[in-house]
Amino acid sequence: MSLFGLTSLSSVALAGTTIELSANDTMQFDSKAFEVPAGEEITLVFTNKGALPKAAMGHNVVILKPGSDVMGFGAGAVAAAATEYVPQSGPLAEQVVAYTKLLGPGETDTIKFKLDAPGEYAFICSFPGHYALMKGIITAK
Ligand SMILES: [Cu+2]
């Protein structure tokens, strides 16, 4: 293989897959469906583009395992206020694959994770009352 070929391959591998997602003051994610390669590192860059205070309109991204009870998780996560509405123990915590910080206006958080098995991974904002509108699917293939 040529030197050029090797260089190209390594730059592709280093780049990985990056997902950019934002949320706003009307309780909406700007995208609700992503497709990513299973088993590879995914970088998620999440931004809260709103202006309302975090206590009133905070947003996060919580990625759940395939088959999770998304509505049940959203309802139960309300009790985890001390950990930014992401349960850290028990059956709800076991459904979590990855999550961002809870963001106030203008804030960004970047996380890296892998979705090892092909499947449909739901993502939601777990701020109280947001999960009914703020949800989507990441499909790993
Ligand atoms: Cu939200």
Image (cartoon, helix red, strand yellow):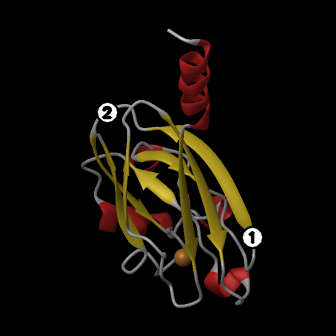
Q: Is residue 23 above or below residue 118?
A: below
Residue 117, which numbered label? 2
Earlier residue among tags 1 and 2:
1
Q: Amino acid at mark 2?
A: Ala
Q: CA distance from mark 1 to mark 2?
A: 31 Å
Q: Is residue 50 above or below residue 91?
A: below
- SS assignment at label 1: loop
Q: Nearer the viewer, residue 63 or 46?
A: 46
Looking at the image, residue 15 sits to the left or right of residue 1; the answer is right
Residue 39, which numbered label? none
Measured as percent of width and height from the top left, residue 51 is found at: 72, 89
Q: Quadrant of ligand 1?
A: bottom right
- SS assignment at label 2: loop
Q: Residue at x 73, y 80 (%)?
A: 105
Q: Are marks 1 and 2 in contact (CB under 8 Å)?
A: no
Q: Amino acid at mark 1?
A: Glu
Q: How many marks?
A: 2
Measured as percent of width and height from the top left, residue 101 is found at: 67, 59
Q: Quadrant of residue 23?
A: bottom right
Residue neighbourhood size for the residue with mark 1, other residues' Cα within 10 Å, grouped as few (<14), some (14–19), many (≥20): some
Measured as percent of width and height from the top left, residue 59 is found at: 60, 73
Q: Residue at x 48, y 81 (%)?
A: 28
Q: Residue at x 24, y 49 (%)?
A: 67
Q: Residue at x 41, y 30 (%)?
A: 39
Q: In this figure, which residue is indicated by the disc labeled 1?
A: 107
Q: Quarter of the image containing the C terminus?
A: top left
